[in-house]
Image: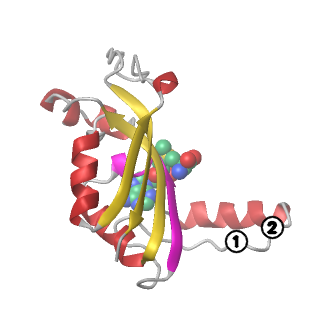
Amino acid sequence: MTPEMVDLARACARDAAVDNVEFRLGEIEHLPLADVSVDVVISNCVINLAADKAAVFREIRRVLKPGGRLAITDTVARAPLPDAVRQNLDLVAGCIGGAITPEEIVGLLKACDFIDIRIEFDPETACKRDGTTGMDFGDLVSAANVTATRHR
Ligand SMILES: C[S@@+](CC[C@H](N)C(=O)[O-])C[C@H]1O[C@@H](n2cnc3c(N)ncnc32)[C@H](O)[C@@H]1O
């Protein structure tokens, strides 16, 4: 997302003598990749931070080849979050306020022609109490694994 992050990633790869990776500067809503060029998209805890999640899934579909797969882990809400949570910028930056529900994710993926959609919550990762605001979420927000395949 920033030139500094890309510089650091390149330095880490050099130090580890890893020469089969490439780092490109870009945003998840505007992937620096050609249409229909990718076999698998993975992402860990970024999509919740994107304001326009429909644009993210459209972009993932654009770059994937037909039959290409999506495997993401992200914070997901078991029920729609109250406006007070969604509008609290500390909670948005803390990967909670931007979490959407499985039903919303399925709707966004289906709108982009994804099939074989699976969403599995990881109960071990329930957010419980937010470190910045001290707010208690019980098990309302947890990490979940989302997998799907681009149909055509
Ligand atoms: C919770 S961290 C996860 C980082 C990494 N994926 C990992 O698993 O360790 C969220 C990351 O998303 C990045 N990010 C936030 N919004 C983004 C966007 N619109 N496009 C690309 N990256 C974004 C932030 O810079 C940050 O590095």
Residue that lies at the very extreme toward the left in this rendered image: 83
Residue at which label 2 appears = 18
Badge 2 vs badge 1, beta-carbon distance below 8 Å: yes
In the rendered view, does 36 fall on the left or right side of 20? left
Residue 132 percent across, percent down from the top left? 40, 23
Characterize the local packing of mark 2: few (<14), some (14-19) or many (20 or more) Cα atoms within 10 angstroms: few
The magenta segment is 38-49
Q: Amino acid at mark 2?
A: Val
- In reply to whether residue 44 is colored magenta, the answer given is yes
Residue at which label 1 appears = 21
At x 32%, y 32%, the residue is 91
At x 43%, y 37%, the residue is 120
Residue 69 percent across, percent down from the top left? 48, 64
Q: Is residue 101 visible?
A: yes
At x 52%, y 23%, the residue is 124
Residue 111 percent across, percent down from the top left? 21, 64
Q: Which mark is residue 94?
A: none
